[in-house]
Image (cartoon, rainbow, N blue to C red):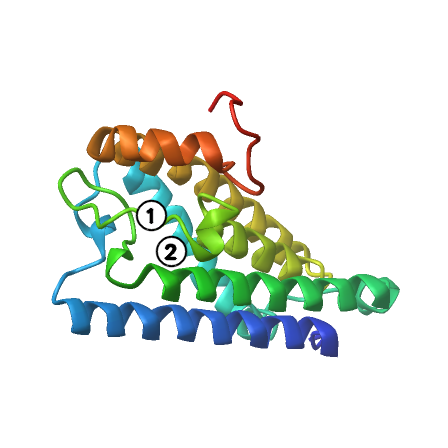
Amino acid sequence: MTPMPPLALAGQAVFAAYVAGFLLLTWRMARTSGTDPWLFARASGVQRWTALAFRLGFALLAALPLLRLVLPRAPEAVAAWPAVLGWLGLLLAVAGAGLALRAQAHMGASWRIGAAEGSLGRLVSDGPFAWSRNPVFLGQIVLVWGVALGGDPVAAILALVVTAAAVVQVAVEERVTDAGLGPEYAAYRARVNRWLGRRRAGRAG
């Protein structure tokens, strides 16, 4: 049994804090708005697979310190991992968690987990959403790769799973939003990039 390096454990702590914040904000939104944001519960088609990938990826990442108690790893591999990558990973994990939670809180009553026709909130286009159409997903991707930079190959595999799920889910949610909000969302899409950055006036969406 080889314990996780301190920087890797710190990244895991950031991830655990993010999951707790995610659940707390979701619970508060559901309580104050009286709506159920868990649209994955009635998902169909590809969203069933993205929902499963998110759940497995996040659950296994959160449980990774415990899994490492039973999954052996060569001490030489742990010792050889560059400390600079561990520090970079920790910084990315903090930045990603902060962005994802900030964007989730900014959505307020529009917060949804998954997408379903007829269940859209109002379009949120200010704050973090003025610079990314999907800052929650962007923050989550940065977070999981920050954790992966702690040097655990299992974390890297799980980061790939979460990233793939996010990319597919974003495409699904944008189609649903485009169908539900029409010109309002089309204008927003023409101003702001899917992941990061604003578009110049007149540039095609």
For disc 1, the neighbor class at 10 Å (few under 14, some 14 to 19, many from 20) is many
For disc 2, the neighbor class at 10 Å (few under 14, some 14 to 19, many from 20) is few
Q: Is residue 151 left or right of residue 125?
A: right
Q: Residue 189's x, y, as percent? A: 42, 33
* Residue at position x 46%, y 24% in the image: 205
On residue 55, which mark appears?
2
Q: Give the quadrant of residue 165.
A: top left
Q: Out of 53 and 39, give the one closest to the viewer.
A: 39
* Residue at position x 38%, y 39% in the image: 169
Name the amino acid type tagged 1: Ala
Q: Residue 55's x, y, as percent? A: 38, 56
Name the amino acid type tagged 2: Arg
Q: Out of 24 and 2, give the one closest to the viewer.
A: 24
Q: Give the quadrant of residue 92.
A: bottom right
* Residue at position x 41%, y 39% in the image: 170
* Residue at position x 73%, y 79% in the image: 6
Are dots 2 and 1 in contact, CB under 8 Å? yes
On residue 202, which mark appears?
none
Q: Is residue 163 left or right of residue 76?
A: left
- Count of marks placed on residues: 2
Q: Is residue 38 above or below residue 14?
A: above
Q: Out of 197 and 88, give the one closest to the viewer.
A: 197
Q: Is residue 127 visible?
A: yes
The residue that label 1 is drawn on is 51
Q: Is residue 45 visible?
A: no
Quadrant containing the N terminus in the rendered view: bottom right
Dot 2 falls on a residue whose secondary structure is helix
Dot 1 falls on a residue whose secondary structure is helix
Q: Is residue 154 above or below residue 201?
A: below
Q: Is residue 186 above or below residue 66?
A: above
